Image (cartoon, coloured by chain):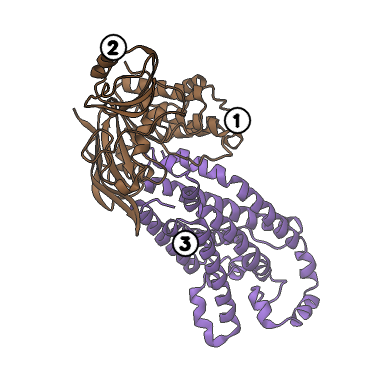
Amino acid sequence: MRNAIELDRLTRSYGRRRGIVDLEVEVHEGEVFGFLGPNGAGKTTTIRVLMGFIRPTSGRATIFGLDAWSDAPRLHRRIAHLGSDPGYLGELTAAELLRHLARLRGFEPAAWRPLAARLDLDPGVPIRKLSRGNRNKVGLVAVFMGHEPLLVLDEPTSALDPLMQREFLRLVAEARADGRTVFLSSHNLPEVERSCDRIGIIRDGRLVEITTVGALLSGHWRSVNLVLGTPPDPGFFDLPNLEVVASSGRDVHLMVRGDVNPFLARIARLDIRDIAITTPDIEDLFLRYYDDQAGAGQLGPTGAPGAPGPPPPTDGRAPARRVAR
Amino acid sequence: MIVPILQLELRRSRALVAWLVVVGLAYGGFMTAFYPTIRSNTTLVDQYLKVWPKELLAAFGLEGSLADPGVFFNTYIGSLLWPILASIGAILIATRAAADLDRGWIELPLSTPTPRARYLGASIAAQLVSLAVLAAACVGGVLAVGLLVGAPFEPGHFAIAALLAFAFGCGIASVTTLLSVVTLNRGTAGGLAAGIVIAMYLLEVVAKIEPDLAAIAAFSAFHYLEFAAVIDTGTFPWTDVAVFAGVSIVSWGFAVLVFRGRDLVA
């Protein structure tokens, strides 16, 4: 599999300020790669290096085998980019802006029209009069109106309503179906969970982990709340991947990690009145990388050495979001 | 690829240039409308001007009789109106690269296959067109009003004056462009450029009122912005235009080099 993007010990600092440190990432052609991290983690710096706006302090960023800095204009024929907060010229209408960008990218001046219609964007309104959500639509139209093989998106849906977020996910899925590569920087975790094949998590400028969304979720704990007909026998839940978080008679709260089949086989013998099994969503997992600064470098929710214990009880949290199958 | 950027940059400059042209035409036209009156009352005007300190008159470029078309133009337009209009126009338009980086606009065109040099080149071309329109309108406005009121103005001489005015504007714009891409901060670049213009103006005034310091005038752009001989005799100011052209080419050239090779971080 060829790589669309390769970051080789990529480091960028701003004087004494940290930017990104020793990033090692390979994004395969045709995949949707999520780049996750909170504000200030280094996502935008990484994208600026990829787009050739800033030079790496050390290391290298290559896209389709070309250097992101020295070959930038050549590469930009193959990249569609959407910044996190593009400073559109407010005096232009959306149509004028999109026509301008289409011409610069060598498209037909009206290349934006079908997508604008699909996203229900009013092209005749000056951009300064558009809501933030509608400005985001302008960005989506701009980035998806072409057929560049690589899309580099920096927090593209921050102000979109749920319907438009769904439309965005469809656009990403269509891009992937076309064999295009998507590099999606986000802190919108459900969005990444639903759209990405793999994700890289960045914290304080350093890459913490690269994994698939599936592996990240499957290697993690599930929270199980049981309401039983009768209290269980002592030691009933003694299984290697099971922990009893709380037990008060007939109510039992357990955490199960990894394979749930032994657990399901064990509880099949019980008189179960109610059960709620939730997997932590990616947000829970993601936050676990950040909630313990003292454990930096030791955290690893997939069970790596030094991995933290089970997540805290989910009692009192939002209702079950997903039932394990 | 350069055409859409040039078109957009010109569009963005349109309102500013239009307002500056209105100011130039209003002030230049108003003063020129009085030129026949000044000319027919030369003796009285000269007597009146003797009341004023020589240094003050020198500061406004008034060296000679206001009845002379060249001195008149130099006093009201060349030493006052044009430097102000050209500086405002040049600084506001030429600091746009820094302003566009600040607001995040610049990433959009530079995410396309447009090379940085071509982008800045288009921006410089827009500066040239804007300054040319401004110079032509201001100088042409004075000429037009002058001809209407019967002033003995030579259109050919005014054409050369417009060229000199344009060259001066280019000098300011080019240095401002360089400051803009070096600092990538509109406030800093604009402030520095305005400071340089004011410092050069003071340098010229000091050189004029203090003969011992006359040599320092060579470092002032205003030293090369003398319209009197151009308007009166039609002498082409080769040296002055060459100085402005040289400063412009070097500054814009460096600006492109710097812009190509630097990080675009506000």
Closer-to-camera residue (B133/A74): A74
* For residue B5, above or below residue B35: above
Judge by depth and name the residue closer to the eye, B234 or A114.
A114
Callout 2: residue from which chain? Answer: A
Horizontal side of A316 relative to B135 (left or right) equals left
Q: Is residue B106 above or below residue B23?
A: above
Secondary structure of the residue carrying tag 3 is helix
Q: Earlier in the sequence, mark 1 or mark 2?
A: 1
Numbered label attached to residue A269 = 2
Can residue A80 be seen from the camera position used here?
no
Instruction: Same chain for labels 3 and 1? Say yes or no.
Output: no
Q: Give how far across and how far down residue B253 sits, in percent.
A: 38, 57
Residue B89 in view here: yes
Other residues around mark 3 within 10 Å, as few (<14) / some (14–19) / many (≥20): many
Q: Quadrant of residue A173?
A: top left
Question: Colour in which chain A is shown?
Answer: brown
Front tag of 3 and 1 = 1
| Image coordinates for residue B132, horizontal then vertical, percent | 55, 53
Depth check, mark 1 against mark 2: the one in front is 2
Say if B38 sits above or below A206 in the image. below
- Near-viewer residue (A237 or A131): A237
Question: The disc numbered 3 marks a residue on which chain?
Answer: B
Q: Which residue was labeled with disc 3?
A: B175
> Which residue corresponds to mark 1?
A125
Identified by mark 3, the residue type is Val
Question: Which amino acid, mark 2?
Answer: Arg
Q: Is residue A261 left or right of residue A173?
A: left
Q: What residue type is disc 1 on?
A: Val
Q: Colour of chain B?
A: purple
| Disc 1/disc 2 C-alpha distance (Å) | 65 Å
Of all residues, the one furthest to the bottom in this rendering is B212
